[in-house]
Image (cartoon, helix red, strand yellow):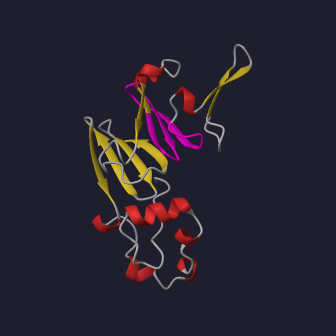
Amino acid sequence: MGTYGGGLSLYDQKQDKWENLNVPNGLADAFVYKTLKVSNGDIWIATWSGANRVRGGDLMDRSKWDVYTVENTKGGLPNDWVYSLEEGKDGEIWLATEGGLARFKDDKWQNWNHAKGVGADYEKIKNDPQFGTDPAKFSEHHAKQKKEMGWETLASPSTPITSFR
C-alpha cells in the first residue's frame, strides 16, 4: 500500500504485522501514488520524485530496485511527479506524470506532453475560471514544473495527466 509521506507499507497476514519501506530502502520518494505488479513479475511504484521498478518483484533485495527520474532518463520521463502506472497489452509500462505521458518499452523511453498533443489546447481553456491562478506562484514544485515544461510565459499551465481509463 502506498502512503502519503510514509512510503510503502506491506501487510504480512501470516505474522499479522506491517513492513514499511521508504527512501533508505530504495524508494524514490515517501509519497507513493500507485503500485503495479506487471506480468513479468516486476513491481512498479509511482512516487512524487520519479518511479521505481523492482525487478522480479523482490522488494527486500535492494539490488533489484531501479529509480527513474527526468534526469537519469534524459527526459524520457517527462516529469518526476508520477501519478499513475498501467501495463500495456505488449508489456510496455505507461506512466502518467504531471508533465505528460511516458512509455517504457524494451528499456527505451518515449513520451508525449502538451506540445505533442496531450492535454487540452491552452488557447481553448485559458479563460476557464479554474485556470485563473498560477500554482507556480505558490508551490516550488509547480514552479520547477513550469520551467521544465517551458511554460514560463504562460499565466497558468494546463492540467497534468493524473489517471488512465
Q: Quadrant of the N terminus?
A: top right
Give me the residue at 30% from left, 53% from top. 111
The percent coordinates of residue 7 (x first, y second) are: 61, 36
Residue 85: in magenta span? no
56 relative to 13 in the view: left or right = left
Q: Which residues are magenta?
A: 28-52
Q: Nearer the viewer, residue 89 or 144?
A: 144
The percent coordinates of residue 12 (x first, y second) are: 67, 19
Give me the residue at 37% from left, 48% from top. 70
**What is the residue that sits farthest to the top in this orientation?**
14
Q: Nearer the viewer, residue 18 or 24?
A: 24
**What is the residue that sits farthest to the bottom in this orientation?**
127
Q: Nearer the viewer, residue 137 or 38?
A: 137
153 relative to 127 in the view: left or right = left
Q: Is residue 85 above or below residue 63?
A: below
The percent coordinates of residue 31 (x first, y second) are: 59, 44
138 relative to 36 in the view: left or right = right
